[in-house]
């Protein structure tokens, strides 16, 4: 983006025409950040909730001192493990925010770190831990050379790539078909991407059956790349045995994908230059980790892992897999949750368990919770239970720039900057670029009002309780020496200069450092293509081989084989969908994105609408075993019969007026937070394929769902 700045205020945003990757393209949310940046509803000063239940402006020192004093008292009564942290999705787009928030709980010795990952992508990292021995090694499709792209539950025409960074991904996908290749989209909905390419409609939450069926064909027809398997993997024969019961003719009734189509997909996937890729739609079912594992297994069995045009490992200037391993941060199962015994994934536990962790007495009960850049009341299952639990805390502190549905229950809201008000290095995403690339920018404008960066706030609070907020023990020890406390830019500089593209502090003359990267305002392309043939040096298992049949996956396949069919009392399946003009729950206060009378509507196939007595524009009650909501209906043939779709992130009742006026409902009230309903290998929430039923609603007047929104939150600033 290019920002026009007048008197330390951004007055205009436009795409950067000279950016080597985006080349003058930006999605609507990028342009709409101007609304967020200058939003009159932004929190610009520290706020404290008073005895009257309203928020009042206080000074930073007053906030720091009171939070520190209350934290010390809580730790004195309940111990350091009574303090928890939840970080939302936007936190991952800052290189300092995750390091300091995770470092804070690690400095305390608390296991209670939670993120939006358990509603998004933790299964992908868990699968990598099983396959490669580290959760931080994630392959991406080599779009520039792919001839057959097989996408499961991904909609890059709207998401523009997820765990995949390709600023002009539409052009890259069209180039695949332009050079005679194929792009196949597996989705229960004819999504924006599916409309452009080959669409295969599938019954929600049956991706694992389809993938095992494709593996069945590949092994049965002798299409596996035996040379690759012998050189780079272990367990191929055991995987073949797992796939044996899943012949296409046997899975067809379950998945809705015809047997001859499965065979065609398997044979296409077995050709060189093919890549399988899955995203959100494939992550949020009952077998999310198994699905992510099988996607990579398809790439490996066909010899398309670490191969040109296949699934490749990015070439970042800062290799997170190396850094994470050396720092002890590449964890999977290092700790287990108090409820359900779920493994941590890169240090974070299932956010769905937060209500139980807060309200259930015991040694590890959470009594103080920090929430940064997050809104779990709208993003985790059963937000009502979490709202009640938040009021049971002895201290709740939020770092954010809005009053949202979660932090309206907090004792303090501490104002954070936007990414235009701090330096920026997309550390977590460098390995996902389809063209190796790096870019660093300084702050464009000073922080608005009294906003302060999250790391600064965390450090000040940590000082008041005698903690150095860093995950590495050596750094914590050094941080106690005056002048040695770490700062973000110094860490970024160290990681970059010692990384694969770094200058090694002058020893590599053409290498990179922060100043050199910052002096290139449009970023630096590091290579035209992602290098391949690196698998042997990437895998962290002692054998240096990809594990294709670990015990955890064998157990999941056994669980899959015994999975029950449909419940007749809930005959339909609910899925989510991405909206081009939404980003989870935090961009609904932008007038630009909300213009045009946007309505939060349930997508229903015409056949299902007729069967349930629904009409386009009418209302329906959508019910699951966990709850019910009333929503407007949009009848559309983009839906597969038997499947309905409702976007997440709506149902606002915070301090943001445009969002509140938009109405809508919280779809995650239909999801369960019961440990028995979470995916076992990553603790992922079950948000895709939820069994539901539909009932027509004659009139919206008088029903509780429509009147559930309270008055706007009062702010005395």
Image (tube, grey):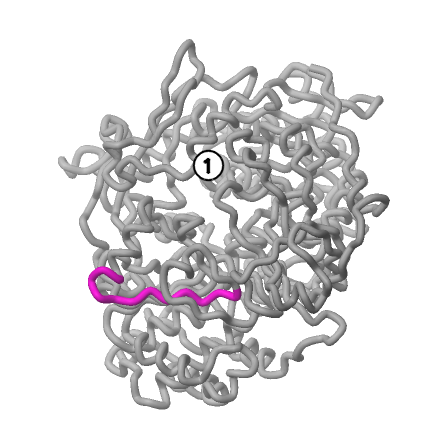
Closer to us: 32 or 144: 32
From the top left corner, tell me how far across and down residue 529 is, in percent: 20, 53
Vertical placement of residue 41 versus 493, above or below: above
Residue at point 64% right, 54% down? 616
- Which element is circle 1 on? helix
| Residue at mark 1 | 29
Image-based side of 707 in relation to 196, left or right? right
Specify the quadrant of the image occupied by residue 339: bottom right
From the top left corner, tell me how far across and down residue 187 is, in percent: 48, 65
Closer to us: 577 or 498: 577
Residue 182 falls inside the magenta stretch: yes
Q: Is residue 536 visible?
A: no
From the top left corner, tell me how far across and down residue 162 is, in percent: 42, 51
Specify the quadrant of the image occupied by residue 626: bottom right
Q: Is residue 1 visible?
A: yes
Closer to us: 461 or 248: 248
From the top left corner, tell me how far across and down residue 402 is, in percent: 62, 29
Residue 484 falls inside the magenta stretch: no
Residue at point 45% right, 51% down? 328
Q: Where are the magenta residues, as a range?
A: 177-188
């Amino acid at each position: 983006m290019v920002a026009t700045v007048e008197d330390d205020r951004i007055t205009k945003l436009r795409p950067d025409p000279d950016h080597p990757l985006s080349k003058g393209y930006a999605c609507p949310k990028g342009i709409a950040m101007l609304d967020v940046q200058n939003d009159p509803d932004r929190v610009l000063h520290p706020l404290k909730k008073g005895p009257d239940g309203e928020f009042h402006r206080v000074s930073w020192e007053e906030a720091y001192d009171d939070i520190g004093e209350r934290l010390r008292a809580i730790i004195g009564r309940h111990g350091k493990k009574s303090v928890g942290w939840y970080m939302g999705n936007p936190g991952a787009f800052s290189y300092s925010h995750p390091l300091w928030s995770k470092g804070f709980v690690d400095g305390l010795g608390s296991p209670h770190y939670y993120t939006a990952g358990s509603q998004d992508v933790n299964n992908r990292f868990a699968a990598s831990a099983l396959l490669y021995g580290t959760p931080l090694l994630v392959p991406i499709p080599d779009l520039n050379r792919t001839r057959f792209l097989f996408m499961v539950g991904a909609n890059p025409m709207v998401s523009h790539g997820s765990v995949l960074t390709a600023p002009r991904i539409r052009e890259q996908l069209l180039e695949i078909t332009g050079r005679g290749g194929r792009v196949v989209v597996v989705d229960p909905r004819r999504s924006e991407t599916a409309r452009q390419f080959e669409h295969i409609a599938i019954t929600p939450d049956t991706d694992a059956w389809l993938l095992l069926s494709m593996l069945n064909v590949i092994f049965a027809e002798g299409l596996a790349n035996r040379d690759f398997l012998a050189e780079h993997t272990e367990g191929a024969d055991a995987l073949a045995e797992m796939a044996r019961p899943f012949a296409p003719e046997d899975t067809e009734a379950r998945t809705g994908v015809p047997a001859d189509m499965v065979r065609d997909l398997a044979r296409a996937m077995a050709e060189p230059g093919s890549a399988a890729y899955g995203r959100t739609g494939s992550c949020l079912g009952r077998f999310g980790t198994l699905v992510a594992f099988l996607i990579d297994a398809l790439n490996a069995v066909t010899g398309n892992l670490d191969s040109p045009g296949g699934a490749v490992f990015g070439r970042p200037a800062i290799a997170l897999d190396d850094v994470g391993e050396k720092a002890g941060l590449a964890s999977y199962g290092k700790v287990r949750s108090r409820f359900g015994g779920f493994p941590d994934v890169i240090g974070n536990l299932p956010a769905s368990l937060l209500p139980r962790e807060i309200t259930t007495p015991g040694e590890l009960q959470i009594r103080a919770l920090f929430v940064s850049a997050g809104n779990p009341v709208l993003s985790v299952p059963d937000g009502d239970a979490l709202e009640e639990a938040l009021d049971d805390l002895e201290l709740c502190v939020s770092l954010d720039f809005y009053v949202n549905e979660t932090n309206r229950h907090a004792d303090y809201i501490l104002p954070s900057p936007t990414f235009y008000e701090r330096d920026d290095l997309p550390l977590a995403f460098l390995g996902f670029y389809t063209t190796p690339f790096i870019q660093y920018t300084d702050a464009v404008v000073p922080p608005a009002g009294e906003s302060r960066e999250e790391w600064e706030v965390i450090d000040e609070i940590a000082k008041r309780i005698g903690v150095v907020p860093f995950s590495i023990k050596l750094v914590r020890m050094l941080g106690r020496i005056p002048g040695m406390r770490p700062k973000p830019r110094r860490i970024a500089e160290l990681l970059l200069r010692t990384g694969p593209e770094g200058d090694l502090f002058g020893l590599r003359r053409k290498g990179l450092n922060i100043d050199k990267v910052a002096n290139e305002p449009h970023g630096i392309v590091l290579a035209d293509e992602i290098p391949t043939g690196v698998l042997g040096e990437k895998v962290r298992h002692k054998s240096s081989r990809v594990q294709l049949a670990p015990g955890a996956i064998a157990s999941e396949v056994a669980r899959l084989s015994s999975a029950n069919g449909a419940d007749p009392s809930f005959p339909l399946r609910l899925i989510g969908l991405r909206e081009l003009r939404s980003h989870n729950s935090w961009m609904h206060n932008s007038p630009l994105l909300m213009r045009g009378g946007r309505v939060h509507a349930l997508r229903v196939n015409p056949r299902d609408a007729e069967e349930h007595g629904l009409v386009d524009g009418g209302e329906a009650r959508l019910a699951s075993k966990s709850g019910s909501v009333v929503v407007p209906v949009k009848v559309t043939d983009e839906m597969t019969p038997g499947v309905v779709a409702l976007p997440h992130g709506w149902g606002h009742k915070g301090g943001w007026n445009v969002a509140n006026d938009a109405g809508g409902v919280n779809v995650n009230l239909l999801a369960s937070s019961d440990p028995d309903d979470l995916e076992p290998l990553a603790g992922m929430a079950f948000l895709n394929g939820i069994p539901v039923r539909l009932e027509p609603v004659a009139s919206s007047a008088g029903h509780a769902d429509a009147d559930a929104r309270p008055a706007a939150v009062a702010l005395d600033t």
